[in-house]
Image (cartoon, grey):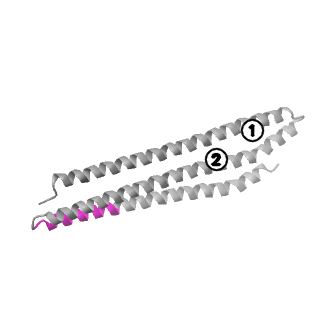
Amino acid sequence: MFPSQEAISQVARANIESSLNLYTALSGKTIESIEKLWTLNLTAAKASLDESSATTRQLLAAKDPQQFIALISAQTKPTLDKAIAYNGHLANIASGVQAEFSRAAEKQFADIGRQFTQFVDEAAKNAPPGSENAVAILKTAFGNAAAGYEQFNKNARQAVHTFEANIANAASQFTPAANQNVTP
């Protein structure tokens, strides 16, 4: 006989509990990330306001157009550096979120895989003679789904690494060009 209704209910209950735990963990990580992003933006906005106020005072105190232009030129590099640093912080937040989501999803998938394997093994023990093919088909289907999930996860990690590398590459190429353009 195939597993009892009670066995099926236990697997379903465990799956729902696992999904709820995943949802709770991901919700917490999402809120933490939003908090980090909010803090980053508030800090950047406050710093920008303070700096623009100080810069405006300096510009208003300029005695001639040359001094005015020199003050503007002097502000360009620090502004570019801050923009690059801000983008780096954003990339770190995004990378951290992706890593947490990936870990949580991997754990969830491993738990579901373990539960499914136990369920199929139990079903195979109690299956009537001649149902070996059906059990083998279930195991193969789950194996294929697991391989597909692993490939998807690998691609997602690669995309994040590529994103981070592109940010770093852009920053490393942008900084020297900005330095050359800022020099009066």
Q: Position of residue 103 (x, y in %)?
A: 44, 57
Instruction: Write down the residue under mark 2.
Output: 86
Residue interval drawn in magenta:
130-147
Q: Secondary structure at mark 1?
A: helix
Q: Secondary structure at mark 2?
A: helix
Question: Which label number is shown at residue 51?
Answer: 1
| Main secondary structure along the magenta-highlighted residues | helix
Query: Residue at position x 83%, y 36% from top?
Result: 58
Q: Position of residue 161 (x, y in %)?
A: 52, 59
Q: Name the outermost residue toward the right.
A: 63
Query: Residue at position x 32%, y 49% from top?
Result: 17
How crowded pointer 1 is (Cα within 10 Å; few <14, some 14-19, many 20+) is rated as some
Location of residue 120 with respect to 32 vertically, above or below:
below
Left or right, residue 118 beside residue 111:
left
Camera-nearest residue between 178 and 133: 133
Identified by mark 2, the residue type is Tyr
Identified by mark 1, the residue type is Glu
How far apart, in angstroms, are the residues tagged by discs 1 and 2?
A: 15 Å
Q: Is residue 136 magenta?
A: yes
